[in-house]
Image: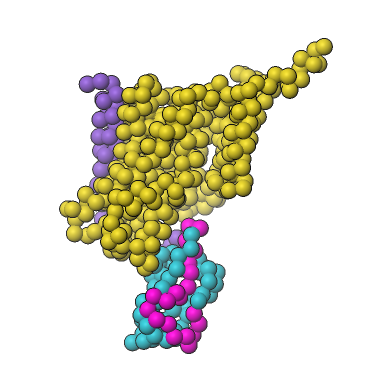
Amino acid sequence: MAEEVLAPLAGKVLSIAVSVGDTVEEDDEVLVLEAMKMETVVYAPSDGEVTAVAVKVGDQVEEDDALATIDG
Amino acid sequence: MSPAANVFLSGLAGVFAGIGLLYLMMKLLARLGATAPDRSASTD
Amino acid sequence: MAFIEQLGVLSVTLGMVAMWAIALTLLYLAIAKQHEPLLLLPIGFGILLANLPLTGLMTPEEGLLWRFYRYGVEWEVIPPLVFLGLGAHTDFGPLLSQPRLIFLGAAAQGGVYLTFFAAQAFGFSLEEAATIGIIGGADGPTTIFLAAQLAPHLLGACAVAAYSYMALVPIIQPPIMRLLTTEQERAIRMKKARKVTAREKLLFPIAATLVIILLVPASAPLIGMFMLGNLFRESKVVERLAETAQDALMNIVTIFLGVSVGATMSAENFLRTDVILIFVLGLVAFTVSTASGLILAKLMNLVSSDKINPLVGAAGVSAVPMAARVVHKMGAEADKKNYLLMFAMGPNLAGVIGTVIAAGIFLSMLG
């Protein structure tokens, strides 16, 4: 079933480590957010295949915004 | 009580009293404000 | 030869040279290490200027730096304006979403009062001791505000201690945090905060102004400006004012604040054994403040089922947002999916308010 990767806090997308079609394991790095001049890594919540990436580098995201979808 | 002890105790009590009142005020605000959802996009 | 007598180089004293070294150290920290450069750079240069001979820069009624200090700092203009900018910059959402965390900001004032007590035991007057204690609040403008009222001769030393230790928060706090918490406690993930409404954020600055100033009137200059700035922001109708307060005006007053603080640090004011003691006591203040925030968080966990990660207590030491960042990093070290930043911002902001209240109480009892 598909699980969304949610933003744990508001911030700017600094880099994205995955793209659609990639297979990830739980706790793999998905992307890096910058909030208050600090980098925060967002990890995959579960194993699976990345079916969607909802943001691009430089986007401003709010807490709980969907960042990507993982189908596992 | 020495003046220093007086300032020490009144100060600590005053800070907690002030913060305690703010706490109650925020609890009240949470009730008053609960009707209007935040549509604004916060920054930072 | 009158001209020879006017040569500055002949009037240089050993004390001045020592102060140049201090000035250059601060400039080095600001420029090469980028520790609080916005403040340490103007402070460092102010020290240099104030310790050059025969300049008259600090001559009462005449000198340029004297005027900056007199009308900006002594007249209590600049620190409140800094707070205006901070208010316009601050989102109180993290605090409003977790009201109980505000108590951690009160607990962190424990360092202020304990240090006050220790300082007067070391022979400082009550006014001096209060000024030294407030360093533990980790809030530059509040320290300067209080010092200008109670102990102007210590202003430079206390301000530099406060700003230096704020820059050193990532070094000072982690060992205390590790000592007082277990790995499991640091890994506690906190329950998601509720969303705060725009109306709450709008009402907060008005209500907080009433509550705090009615209780501690002497805190009015700082709290009043802080909350006015915040109302600029949250009202959403005066974005120009909010923007000016937090950018242009803040930058302007920072220049005058830094130079004025540096200018107070003449050799005779600064090269005293007292000053070493002030730096030691300031460090004690930071340490105790960090510890008391942590300890209150742990105490709150004894009675609450909804666990608080005790690390966020350390963010009650205001130093916004450095202390919150430290908390976030340490939480992520214990559990890489633990995101504490926003939880730590609550006590962090509460710490600012707590320090201003503490300063107000000192002023009303000793001023």
Magenta stretch holds residue A29: yes
Rendered location of residue C296, percent (x, y) = 25, 47
Vertically, is C174 above or below C286?
below
Judge from the rendering whether residue C152 lies leftward or rightward of residue C16; answer left or right. left
Q: State the purple chain.
A: B
Judge from the rendering whether residue C83 lies leftward or rightward of residue C98; answer left or right. right
Judge from the rendering whether residue C242 lies leftward or rightward of residue C295; answer left or right. right
Q: Give the colouring mode of the picture.
A: by chain
Q: Quadrant of residue B38?
A: bottom left
> Which residue is painted at 47% across and 29% down in the image?
C276
Quadrant showing the N terminus of chain C: top right
Residue C302 in sight here = yes
Vertically, is A25 above or below C309?
below
The one nearer the camera, A45 or C26, is: C26
Magenta residues? A18-37
Q: State the cyan chain.
A: A
Q: State the yellow chain.
A: C
Vertically, is C286 above or below C145?
below
> Which residue is painted at 28% across and 21% down in the image?
B3
Judge from the rendering whether residue C317 lies leftward or rightward of residue A18; answer left or right. left
Rendered location of residue C19, percent (x, y) = 60, 29
Vertically, is C209 above or below C262?
below
The one nearer the camera, A37 or C114, is: C114
Q: Quadrant of residue C44?
A: top right
Rendered location of residue C6, percent (x, y) = 76, 17
Quadrant showing the C terminus of chain C: top left
